[in-house]
Amino acid sequence: MILSGGVQMSTKEERRKYDREFKLEAVRLSHEPGRSVSGVARNLGISANVLHRWRGQLADSGKGAFPGKGHMTLEQEELRRLRRELADVTEERNILKKALAVFSRRRD
């Protein structure tokens, strides 16, 4: 069941999930002059602690903040790509080693 403001609640659990746009808008509102974090949080129906955490995540990760379930941060995605590339290069090296051994035996 989806509520207004990007809130998604399942029937099994009471934990609310917020989409990336909702979090970004909440953080933006909390930075506006004349608005307090607790006031914005109260208006949005969230805890001030949650809003403080979102502000920290956005400050730390920038555009990579709030990647969502199943998505990776930019650093995690690069690490995954580099590991895959390393595995490919290692496999290619092993194939070349075996080929060298095969061709070396045939010459003798």
Image (tube, rainbow, N blue to C red):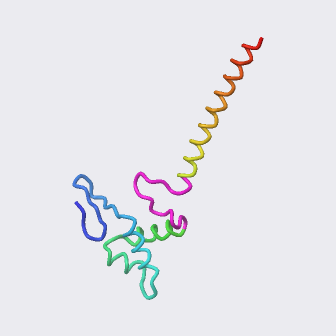
Q: Is residue 22 left or right of residue 81?
A: left
Which residue is nearer to you in this view: 104 or 3?
A: 104
Q: Is residue 89 magenta?
A: no
Q: Quadrant of the C terminus?
A: top right
Q: Residue at x 74, y 17 (%)?
A: 104
Extreme residue in the bottom direction: 34
- Asked if residue 76 lies left or right of residue 38, the reply is right
Horizontal relation, residue 86 to residue 61: left or right:
right
- Which quarter of the rendering shows the N terminus? bottom left
Residue 3 location (% of width, % of height)? 24, 66
Instruction: Based on the picture, tell me whether residue 68 belongs to the magenta stretch.
Output: yes
The foreground one among 96 and 18 is: 96
Give residue 9's position: percent from left, percent from top: 26, 60
Residue range in magenta is: 60-76
Q: Is residue 92 above or below residue 54?
A: above
Residue 66: percent from the left, percent from the top? 44, 62
Rendered view: 58 above or below 96 = below
Q: Residue at x 27, y 58 (%)?
A: 14
Residue 47 percent across, percent down from the top left: 36, 70
Give the farthest residue toward the front. 107
Q: Is residue 3 above or below residue 68?
A: below
What residue is shown at x 50% (from left), y 68% (from top)?
Answer: 58
The residue lying furthest to the right in this view is 108
In the picture provided, is 23 more to the left or to the right than 99? left
88 or 13: which is nearer to us? 88
Q: How many marks?
A: 0
